[in-house]
Amino acid sequence: MALPTAKAAGPPAATGRAVRVSRGQQPTPSSLTGFQRWAWRTFGPRVAAKEPNIALEENLVKAHIRMRADEYQATVLATTVVVGIGTAVVGVAAGVLFLLSHSVLLGLGLFVLPVVATPLAWVILSGTPASTAKSRGTKIDRKIGPAMSFVSAMASADVNVDQIFKELGRQKIYGEVAEEAAWITRDTELLGVDILTAIRRGAQRTPSKRFQDFLQGVVTTATSGGQLKPYFLLKAEQYEREHKLEIQQRVETMGLLAETFVTVVVAFPLFLVIIIAIFAIIGGGGAFMIEILWGIVLAMIPLSQFGFIFFMYSLAQEMT
């Protein structure tokens, strides 16, 4: 579960349960920002009256967004209202100015701005936890192979399971995998649960299916009386093979995209420009054809090139 956050309306009620922290450290609860506290005070009762959003709660935990579902819903609602009012004021004021300057089309477009911006803000903010959780899952899958090699090396040295996850959580080079391991260590050292329960909770909240299967395998192997060392070694070999296959598939995809780039972005616009130029010379309608040429040169070619560059960069980043 996510770290508890205090309501803006007042301090959390005491539970009477002792929480252990390291010597010399103080507990630091996740606090809301000023805007989030205002959103909770203003829209909290309305959100609390609705049914709990279980899916949102799970996505917030998987995304490591340290807010409750009702707090996040209040923040989304408040942000949407602010965006709606702001775009309405700006759109109406700017639209009137453009209408007075005889820019009718642009002025009418600005009047429509709040109608488009308000639901767009709602959709983007409502989908942020799910998209963030999905992004974390992708990052975990990207680093799970090297992380399992580290785990298998620690297991070969007969290190205890709780110490393995603790050391894995300290290795920031493994990215989100280290973050998941650190939360398992938090459950054991801060919340006082046993290591198998902490691993089981980690399997429930991780956004990565592969890491979830790994954690569930750890629990199953330990509870069934099996040995964890061979299991860790087997999973490290499995993820290494899968990583090599994924790299090979991405390299083949990048090669196919390179051939497509030459055909679609280089050759096709060149032939199109030549054909349109010939039509403009011998077929009449020169002004219209020239506008089409300008559109191809200034819009079609740069956008297609930047699109291919961005896609190739994304594939290259997944290979690192």
Image (spheres, rainbow, N blue to C red):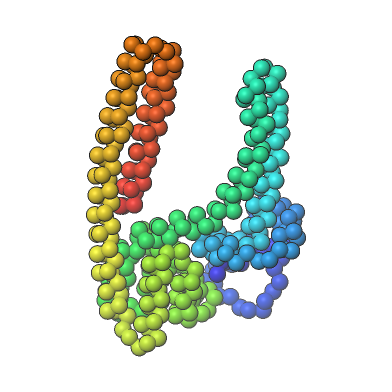
> Along the horizontal axis of the image, is 70 left or right of 316?
right
Q: Of residues 164 and 127, which is closer to you in this image? A: 127
Res 10 seen here: no
> Along the horizontal axis of the image, is 123 left or right of 140?
right
138 is higher (above) or lower (below) than 25: above
Q: Position of residue 78 (x, y in %)?
A: 69, 50
Q: Position of residue 183 (x, y in %)?
A: 48, 68
> Along the horizontal axis of the image, is 225 left or right of 291?
left
The residue located at (44%, 75%) in the rendering is: 199
Q: Position of residue 148 (x, y in %)?
A: 32, 68
How many numbered discs sit on the rendered protein?
Answer: 0
The residue located at (68%, 55%) in the rendering is: 74
Q: Of residues 293 and 168, which is closer to you in this image? A: 293
Q: Position of residue 120 (x, y in %)?
A: 60, 44
Res 96 seen here: yes
> Along the horizontal axis of the image, is 83 left or right of 63?
right
The residue located at (30%, 63%) in the rendering is: 146
- Name which quarter of the figure residue 138 lies in: bottom left
The residue most toward the bottom is 225
The residue located at (31%, 20%) in the rendering is: 275
- Name which quarter of the figure residue 310 lies in: top left
184 is higher (above) or lower (below) than 292: below
**Quarter that holds the N terminus:** bottom right
